[in-house]
Image (cartoon, rainbow, N blue to C red):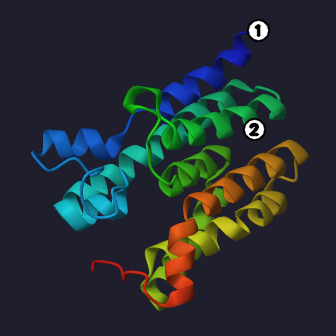
Amino acid sequence: MIDYLFVPIAYLAGSISSAIIVCRVMGLPDPRTLGSNNPGATNVLRIGGKKAAALTLFGDMLKGLLPVLAAHLFGVETAILAATSIAAFLGHLYPIFFGFKGGKGVATALGVQFGLGWEIGASVALIWIFVAKVLNISSLAALVSMGVAPLVVWFFWPSPELIIAQTFISIVLFWRHRNNILNLLSGSEDKIGS
């Protein structure tokens, strides 16, 4: 019975907005009111610089990593592990503590992947870094890396529940990036650091 507690705990952990907290502590404007209005690391980079963005990225990854890693180490069945992964991700997107208005979920999804296994997280992160270095567009790097993430999970841990969970995460992440996709298609998407 205690295994099921990982799911609501993961959602509550995901609901902690690193971007908003970092900006408040550092005396920066609320990231929901400037730039892309998205409480995520990329927007914090625009309005607060590299240090604030790095702290936001680290916090967003941790809230995906810690609940999933804890559930994984606790030895819960894969269906609960998959549900825990989704809960942490959805907590970031729809945080109960911040009016259900959260970020796009890339860093939290990456934290989830590291929680499943360092090989999974490292593979997805390396794909993101490669695309970002070559094309210098954060959203495109996110879309490519998360688009192939279900295949990465399948390669390292071919569990149907985990593959379905990662596919769900990737689909929702694409939906959250729909405006970025339109900008990419029109050639108007911002470069990293712009």
Q: For residue 97, which quarter of the picture?
A: top left
Which comes sooner in the sequence, label 1 or label 2? 1
Residue annotated with mark 2: 82
At a point 76% along the width and 46% down the height, the residue shown is 165
Badge 2 density bin: few <14, some 14–19, many ≥20, Cα 10 Å:
many
- Helix, strand or loop status at disc 1: loop
Q: Amino acid at mark 1?
A: Met
Q: Position of residue 122 (x, y in %)?
A: 58, 63
Q: Is residue 157 left or right of residue 144?
A: right
- Helix, strand or loop status at disc 2: helix
Q: Work out whether residue 63 can be spotted.
A: yes
Q: For residue 146, which quarter of the picture?
A: bottom right
At a point 63% along the width and 63% down the height, the residue shown is 174
Q: Position of residue 134 (x, y in %)?
A: 48, 90
- How many numbered badges does the structure rendering display? 2
The label shown at residue 1 is 1
> From what the image shows, is residue 36 above or below residue 182?
above
In the image, 36 versus 89, the foreground residue is 36
The label shown at residue 94 is none
In the image, 104 versus 187, the foreground residue is 187
Tell me the quadrant of the picture where the C terminus can be found. bottom left
> From what the image shows, is residue 51 above or below residue 185?
above
Q: Position of residue 160 (x, y in %)?
A: 90, 47
Q: Position of residue 140 (x, y in %)?
A: 54, 77
